[in-house]
Amino acid sequence: MFDLDLWREIFQSINMNRTRSLLSGFTVAFAILLFTVLFAIANGLQNTFSEAFVDEAANSIFIKSGRTTKAHKGLQAGRRIQFKNEDFDYVKEEFGDKVEFITARIYKNVNATYKNEQSTYPLRAVHPDHQFLEKTLIQSGRYINQNDLDNNTKSVVIGRLVEEDLFIKKEALGKYINLNGIPYKVVGVFHDDGGDNEERIIYMPVTTAQRIYGNNDYINQINLTYNPEMDYDQALSFSTLLTKKLKNRFSIAKNDQRAVRVRNMAQGTKAISQMSFGLTIIILVIGFGTLIAGIVGISNIMIFIVKERTKEIGIRKALGASPKSIVSIILIESILITAIAGYIGLLIGVGVLELVGPSLEDYFIKDPGVSNSLVIGATATLIIAGAIAGYLPAKKASKIKPIIALRND
């Protein structure tokens, strides 16, 4: 295979038959190009779906209150439903075996200052379990703990960008910031894969917020994660039961959809999973269909090439060339053209994705890309197909007697 004369002869053959070589190469390059782009788009869509849920646990349930839209049991429509600590405790105790983590939320906006720096940030007052619902990743220090709740401590956990805004290049951990004029100790700094908005949030104990901002036991929202051992149907049944029990608790009509709203991430997760699966199947069918078309194309071309070179094979045999050397020349030429064309197709595909990739985010396709192993596997498949397609007719042609091959038209 490393015979210099052999390789020189192969390149001479390719050069003398440029049209044939280009046609073979184009078939392979186009197949790899289309294969790369299709799978990259599929991966981009899956990235978009995954990112939509990156900030929240996949088994989350969000319980929000609103106003009643229907009169029920002598109570007027338009009644405001307000959750309290006792409602949080009720959910926690009533559904204990079905609940993995649970937290309340209180929403505020606060003006935060540290020395000469100040800015306004959203504040969330929460329970310790909130860390696991939001996938909050502690960068330094700690998160809100039970001691903070029990003692109403003036402790806060701030996002990475809050630290950058207020403390510039200094560490915030252990220092005090003023929130609406009240000093709080920074006990932790976190980062969040959900993006910049999530990293500009300040967390404090829910009991502290209740005491300082209203001196009451009101909460705005109850969030929880259901037992991860539940399947999709069990998770939906749980949220249905939860909705029913809360409506009974607050005397809300069964068909009132706004007074208590329960959103189960299982619904979105299953829909996304089904969509991703369907998309993957479609892309696989189209991608492998393209690959098969490329295999058929390169096979037909190689059969034609061998038939076209029958007279050349006859001359080689007349001059003493062995059948093995004849087959080797055609086989290596086929593999070389397929490999080079496949690589060119890959480069063009990657180039196209680099060029148009950023603009595809407008169509919900984020960071489209394809693994090298997948493309290399597809190229190897075409190379093997090209080799087999070249070998079989070449082997047959190499057995033809020289006089018969020379008479071939």
Image (tube, helix red, strand yellow):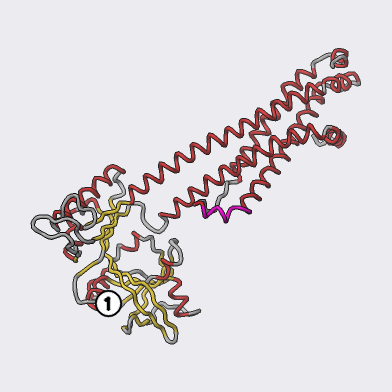
Q: Label 1: few (<14), some or many (≥20) within 10 Å?
A: some
Question: Which quarter of the picture shows residue 3?
Answer: top right
Picture quarter with the N terminus: top right
Q: Which percent across, then down, holds residue 145?
A: 29, 69
For this orientation, the residue located farthest to the right is 319
* Foreground residue among 60 and 31: 31
Q: From this view, report whether residue 107 is shown above or below residue 33.
A: below
For this orientation, the residue located farthest to the left is 74
Picture quarter with the C terminus: top right
Q: Is residue 357 magenta?
A: yes
* Foreground residue among 105 and 261: 261
Look at the image and give the residue range highlighted in magenta.
354-362
Q: Is residue 290 magenta?
A: no
Q: From this view, report whether residue 210 is shown above or below residue 300.
A: below
Residue at screen point 64% across, 46% down: 349
Q: Which percent across, then down, holds residue 227?
A: 28, 50
